[in-house]
Amino acid sequence: MKYLTVLVYFGVLLSFTQVAFCGDEDRLFYDAVRAEASGNLDQAIDYYLKASKISHSANLYGNLANLFFKKEQFGLAILYFRKALLLQPRNSELATNLAFAYEMAKIPKSKEGFKGSYFSENTISLWGLFCTLIFWSGLVLLIYLFFFKNSKLMLFNTTVCWVILLGLGLYATNLSLIRQTELSREVVAHIADNDKNSSGTISLRRFAGETNSENTTVNPGECLIISLGKDENTKQHKSSDGINWFLVRSKNGNQKGWIREDEFGWIINPAPRT
């Protein structure tokens, strides 16, 4: 019995030691898990959001997305599923949950097509490797043909094929780079916390400001691209009431307008402006 008591005290001491020395993000994460288990979803979301300002993980973002999904805030659910998949792009469970969130938000599945599938932001490393292999293997082959073979036709044909393949590889790398750059400006629309609009949509206005008429509307969960100004910085404007507005467009370019900063979330958080 004496040994059992010692073991119990030791276990309690060990648990307190782990809590005392764990990081703030771990403490907030476990506080969120306990709040969710007790049914307090709002408090759990608050803890997860605080933890996300300290560290980033697919597990954290996935849990946050699931909570927003339970609260039927599908725009925010899609945002955090996208953030989670950015960290774990091969996670099939996250991909399935994201697809279900799109379905519940009544957003049609985007058709990436050939260009979106093979020249996405995730393929830039693959195309870079392809260009490297084509360049050096082709160069070695051309040197061999030039010095050790007498066939000018073979040398010419090989040179043409080498240039074509290298050009295609560079073109593909450039497309992937453009998509990767665009991803840094991609946002997801969602209903603002203090929004009194009962329509369930987000207005894209003709000009920055609440009093301006809407140009079009988008549904919560739709992906938008922040437009760039002539100085290659994001096009934004602060209205007289102190609200930041951003000029955005849909991914297909058919919809365009100004949106309030609290009506969207960044997939990749931008670096603070100096």
Image: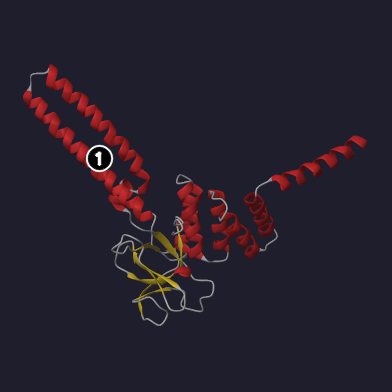
The amino acid beneath tag 1 is Gly
Q: Is residue 99 placed above or below 202 in the rendered structure?
A: above
- Judge left or right: residue 204 versus residue 48: left
- Judge left or right: residue 262 versus residue 227: right
Farthest residue in the front direction? 274
Farthest residue in the bottom direction? 211
The answer to whether residue 1 is seen in the rendering is: no
Q: Is residue 212 placed above or below 154 in the rendered structure?
A: below
Q: Nearer the viewer, residue 255 or 258?
A: 258
- How many numbered marks does the figure carry? 1
Q: Residue at x 31, y 46 (%)?
A: 118
Q: Quadrant of residue 155?
A: top left
Residue 258 x, y percent position in the rendering: 37, 72
Residue 106 x, y percent position in the rendering: 43, 66
Q: Quadrant of the C terminus?
A: bottom left
Element type at mark 1: helix
- Judge left or right: residue 198 versus residue 111: right
- Judge left or right: residue 248 versus residue 30: left
Q: Residue at x 20, y 37 (%)?
A: 165
Q: Residue at x 54, y 49 (%)?
A: 57
Q: Quadrant of the N terminus?
A: top right
- Scheme of image coloration: secondary structure
Residue 102 x, y percent position in the rendering: 45, 61
Local crowd size for mark 1, using a 10 Å CA cut-off: few (<14), some (14–19), many (≥20): many
Q: Is residue 121 placed above or below 2 in the rendered structure?
A: below
Farthest residue in the right direction? 2
Residue occupied by mark 1: 169
The answer to whether residue 184 is seen in the rendering is: yes
Q: Quadrant of residue 65?
A: bottom right
Residue 60 x, y percent position in the rendering: 57, 52
